[in-house]
Amino acid sequence: MAKFEFDIKQLENNIVGRIGKIQNVSGNPAYGSILQRAGARLAEYFKGTLISLGKDDTGQLIDSIKPTDVKITGNNEKSIDVYPHGMRKPTARQRGVRNAMVGFVHEYGSSKVKASHWMSNTVDDVGDEIAQMVADGVSQIIENQLKGK
């Protein structure tokens, strides 16, 4: 009969040592660029959806969609938002209308515009891909930290 012994302390020390090398991922400068790339990709999808729905009459809404700069909360957590920015160029019909409001109307509809749910449907369609982009980037950060890079 063979006897197998394993020193659990050795395992604990190995795990603690490796985890100690993994710093707060969101505090890593590379994490911000991962979020920026994911945000830019989501913006491309939003634009493509609007074009496919024929919502590109003036191009102002589509041109205004972009990711924000990386935001840092009090917990040092980073995030990014992707939405239509800025004001529309004034026309005889519209004065001082924000692109975000136009996007909102196209998303949820109004008495004159049918709801298209362009943002929520796009996120439903590509959300997993965007999340995987971020997960892959985070995995690379962790791998690099474990290798001492």
Image: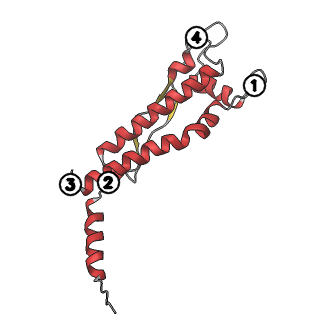
Between label 4 and label 2, give the one nearer the viewer: 2
Secondary structure beneath disc 2?
Answer: helix
Q: Earlier in the sequence, mark 4 or mark 1?
A: 4
Disc 4 residue type (three-letter) = Pro
Q: Earlier in the sequence, mark 4 or mark 2?
A: 4
Between label 1 and label 2, give the one nearer the viewer: 2
Seen at 62% across and 12% down, the residue is 57
Q: On the rendered structure, is 93 left or right of 25? A: right
Q: Earlier in the sequence, mark 1 or mark 2?
A: 1
Q: On the rendered structure, is 128 left or right of 71? A: right
Cα separation, mark 4 vs mark 2, equals: 48 Å
Where is residue 143 shown, x and y percent of the image? Answer: 30, 53
Q: Quadrant of the N terminus?
A: bottom left
Q: Are marks 2 and 3 in contact (CB under 8 Å)?
A: no
In terms of depth relative to the viewer, which is nearer, 147 or 97? Answer: 147
Disc 1 residue type (three-letter) = Lys
Between label 4 and label 1, give the one nearer the viewer: 1
Q: Which mark is residue 148?
A: 3
Tag 4 residue: 90
Please identify the quarter of the rendering in which residue 113 is found: top right
Q: Earlier in the sequence, mark 1 or mark 3?
A: 1
Cα separation, mark 2 vs mark 3, equals: 10 Å
Q: Which mark is residue 114?
A: 1
